[in-house]
Image (tube, rainbow, N blue to C red):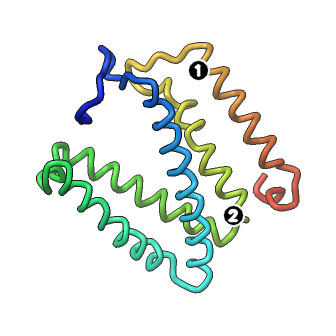
Amino acid sequence: MSVVGLKKDEGDRVLGSFAPVKGASLMIFGCGLLSLNDAAMKLAVEDTPIYQAIFIRGVFAFIPIILLAKFQGGLKQLRWRNLTGQLKAAFLWTASVFLFTWSLQFLPLTIAVVMIYASPLFVAAMAYRVPDEKVGWGHTCAVIVGVIGVVFVVQPGSEAISWVV
Protein backbone atom coordinates (compact mmCIF):
# COMPACT_ATOMS: atom_id res chain seq x y z
CA MET A 1 0.00 0.00 0.00
CA SER A 2 1.39 3.36 -0.96
CA VAL A 3 0.70 6.60 0.84
CA VAL A 4 0.26 9.51 -1.53
CA GLY A 5 2.85 12.29 -1.27
CA LEU A 6 5.59 10.32 0.52
CA LYS A 7 8.86 9.63 -1.25
CA LYS A 8 10.25 6.12 -0.91
CA ASP A 9 13.67 4.57 -1.51
CA GLU A 10 14.45 1.27 -3.25
CA GLY A 11 13.57 -0.70 -0.12
CA ASP A 12 10.08 0.88 -0.01
CA ARG A 13 11.04 2.86 3.12
CA VAL A 14 9.52 6.29 3.57
CA LEU A 15 12.01 9.11 3.19
CA GLY A 16 11.77 12.39 5.03
CA SER A 17 12.82 13.95 8.27
CA PHE A 18 9.56 13.41 10.15
CA ALA A 19 8.69 9.88 8.97
CA PRO A 20 10.54 8.05 11.80
CA VAL A 21 9.22 10.44 14.43
CA LYS A 22 5.69 10.08 13.13
CA GLY A 23 6.03 6.28 13.00
CA ALA A 24 7.41 6.09 16.54
CA SER A 25 4.71 8.45 17.83
CA LEU A 26 1.97 6.38 16.25
CA MET A 27 3.49 3.20 17.70
CA ILE A 28 3.69 4.69 21.21
CA PHE A 29 0.11 5.95 20.95
CA GLY A 30 -1.03 2.53 19.69
CA CYS A 31 0.74 0.72 22.53
CA GLY A 32 -0.88 3.10 25.00
CA LEU A 33 -4.29 2.31 23.54
CA LEU A 34 -3.54 -1.42 23.77
CA SER A 35 -2.69 -0.99 27.45
CA LEU A 36 -5.95 0.87 28.03
CA ASN A 37 -7.77 -1.91 26.19
CA ASP A 38 -6.10 -4.53 28.38
CA ALA A 39 -7.16 -2.67 31.52
CA ALA A 40 -10.73 -2.38 30.22
CA MET A 41 -10.81 -6.09 29.38
CA LYS A 42 -9.49 -6.94 32.86
CA LEU A 43 -12.44 -5.04 34.32
CA ALA A 44 -14.89 -6.49 31.79
CA VAL A 45 -14.07 -10.14 32.47
CA GLU A 46 -14.66 -9.73 36.19
CA ASP A 47 -18.43 -9.83 35.70
CA THR A 48 -18.89 -10.68 32.00
CA PRO A 49 -18.24 -14.02 30.29
CA ILE A 50 -14.98 -14.00 28.30
CA TYR A 51 -16.61 -14.82 24.97
CA GLN A 52 -19.08 -11.94 25.39
CA ALA A 53 -16.34 -9.41 26.22
CA ILE A 54 -14.30 -10.52 23.19
CA PHE A 55 -17.36 -10.40 20.92
CA ILE A 56 -18.31 -6.87 22.00
CA ARG A 57 -14.73 -5.68 21.53
CA GLY A 58 -14.70 -7.27 18.08
CA VAL A 59 -17.93 -5.54 17.06
CA PHE A 60 -16.51 -2.17 18.05
CA ALA A 61 -13.21 -2.93 16.29
CA PHE A 62 -15.11 -3.76 13.10
CA ILE A 63 -16.50 -0.22 12.74
CA PRO A 64 -13.14 1.57 12.22
CA ILE A 65 -11.99 -1.27 9.93
CA ILE A 66 -14.98 -0.69 7.64
CA LEU A 67 -14.46 3.09 7.71
CA LEU A 68 -10.73 2.76 6.98
CA ALA A 69 -11.37 0.39 4.07
CA LYS A 70 -14.02 2.73 2.68
CA PHE A 71 -11.62 5.69 2.70
CA GLN A 72 -8.76 3.68 1.18
CA GLY A 73 -10.42 2.47 -1.98
CA GLY A 74 -13.75 1.02 -0.96
CA LEU A 75 -14.95 -2.18 0.62
CA LYS A 76 -13.32 -4.20 -2.19
CA GLN A 77 -10.13 -3.74 -0.13
CA LEU A 78 -11.53 -6.35 2.27
CA ARG A 79 -11.69 -9.20 -0.26
CA TRP A 80 -9.66 -12.31 0.46
CA ARG A 81 -6.59 -12.97 -1.62
CA ASN A 82 -5.43 -16.06 0.28
CA LEU A 83 -8.38 -17.68 2.06
CA THR A 84 -6.37 -20.51 3.63
CA GLY A 85 -3.76 -18.14 5.02
CA GLN A 86 -6.45 -15.76 6.27
CA LEU A 87 -8.32 -18.58 8.03
CA LYS A 88 -5.12 -19.82 9.69
CA ALA A 89 -4.24 -16.29 10.82
CA ALA A 90 -7.81 -15.71 12.06
CA PHE A 91 -7.74 -18.94 14.07
CA LEU A 92 -4.39 -18.07 15.66
CA TRP A 93 -5.49 -14.49 16.41
CA THR A 94 -8.77 -15.68 17.94
CA ALA A 95 -6.98 -18.25 20.09
CA SER A 96 -4.41 -15.70 21.29
CA VAL A 97 -7.07 -13.10 22.14
CA PHE A 98 -9.13 -15.68 24.01
CA LEU A 99 -6.15 -17.03 25.96
CA PHE A 100 -4.83 -13.55 26.81
CA THR A 101 -8.25 -12.37 27.95
CA TRP A 102 -8.72 -15.53 29.99
CA SER A 103 -5.31 -15.00 31.61
CA LEU A 104 -6.48 -11.61 32.89
CA GLN A 105 -8.63 -13.45 35.45
CA PHE A 106 -5.55 -15.11 36.93
CA LEU A 107 -2.69 -12.62 36.53
CA PRO A 108 -2.15 -9.07 37.71
CA LEU A 109 -2.56 -6.68 34.80
CA THR A 110 1.05 -5.52 35.03
CA ILE A 111 2.40 -9.05 34.59
CA ALA A 112 0.00 -9.80 31.72
CA VAL A 113 0.96 -6.61 29.88
CA VAL A 114 4.70 -7.21 30.28
CA MET A 115 4.25 -10.77 29.00
CA ILE A 116 2.22 -9.66 25.96
CA TYR A 117 4.76 -6.97 25.09
CA ALA A 118 7.50 -9.60 25.36
CA SER A 119 5.79 -11.81 22.77
CA PRO A 120 7.75 -10.28 19.84
CA LEU A 121 10.88 -11.66 21.49
CA PHE A 122 9.46 -15.16 21.14
CA VAL A 123 8.61 -14.49 17.50
CA ALA A 124 12.16 -13.26 16.90
CA ALA A 125 13.59 -16.27 18.74
CA MET A 126 11.64 -18.60 16.42
CA ALA A 127 12.71 -16.78 13.23
CA TYR A 128 15.30 -19.42 12.44
CA ARG A 129 12.40 -21.80 11.64
CA VAL A 130 11.14 -19.58 8.83
CA PRO A 131 12.58 -20.54 5.43
CA ASP A 132 14.98 -17.98 3.92
CA GLU A 133 15.10 -16.03 7.20
CA LYS A 134 18.67 -15.12 8.12
CA VAL A 135 19.38 -15.10 11.84
CA GLY A 136 22.68 -13.48 12.77
CA TRP A 137 24.60 -12.80 15.96
CA GLY A 138 23.08 -9.34 16.35
CA HIS A 139 19.58 -10.78 16.15
CA THR A 140 20.39 -13.53 18.66
CA CYS A 141 22.05 -11.09 21.08
CA ALA A 142 19.10 -8.69 20.86
CA VAL A 143 16.66 -11.48 21.75
CA ILE A 144 18.83 -12.60 24.69
CA VAL A 145 19.10 -9.03 26.02
CA GLY A 146 15.34 -8.59 25.55
CA VAL A 147 14.55 -11.77 27.49
CA ILE A 148 16.90 -10.68 30.29
CA GLY A 149 15.08 -7.33 30.35
CA VAL A 150 11.70 -9.05 30.62
CA VAL A 151 12.96 -11.25 33.44
CA PHE A 152 14.29 -8.13 35.20
CA VAL A 153 10.90 -6.36 34.87
CA VAL A 154 8.73 -9.36 35.77
CA GLN A 155 11.01 -10.47 38.63
CA PRO A 156 10.14 -14.18 38.69
CA GLY A 157 10.84 -14.44 42.42
CA SER A 158 8.17 -11.86 43.20
CA GLU A 159 4.97 -12.94 44.91
CA ALA A 160 2.79 -12.11 41.90
CA ILE A 161 4.59 -14.45 39.52
CA SER A 162 6.23 -17.08 41.79
CA TRP A 163 3.47 -19.65 41.22
CA VAL A 164 3.87 -19.39 37.42
CA VAL A 165 7.58 -20.21 37.55
Relative vertical location of residue 91 with respect to residue 45 in this rendering, above or below: above
Mark 2 Cα within 10 Å, few/some/many (few <14, many 20+)?
A: some
Name the quadrant containing residue 163.
bottom right
Name the quadrant containing residue 140.
top right
Q: Position of residue 152 (x, y in %)?
A: 81, 41
Q: Quadrant of the N terminus?
A: top left
Q: Position of residue 4 (x, y in %)?
A: 23, 34
Question: In front: 3, or 62?
Answer: 3
Q: Position of residue 165 (x, y in %)?
A: 78, 51
Q: CA distance from mark 2 to mark 1?
A: 29 Å
Q: Amino acid at mark 1?
A: His
Relative vertical location of residue 162 with respect to residue 21 in this rendering, above or below: below
Tag shown at residue 139: 1
Name the quadrant containing residue 121.
top right
Looking at the image, tell me whether mark 2 or mark 1 is earlier in sequence order: 2
Is residue 161 left or right of 60 when viewed as pictured?
right
Mark 2 — residue?
109
- Considering the numbered disc 1 on the image, is that residue within a helix, a strand or a loop? helix
Residue at the location (55% across, 39% down)? Answer: 120
Tag shown at residue 122: none
Residue at the location (57% across, 68% down)? Answer: 102
Q: Are marks 2 and 1 in contact (CB under 8 Å)?
A: no
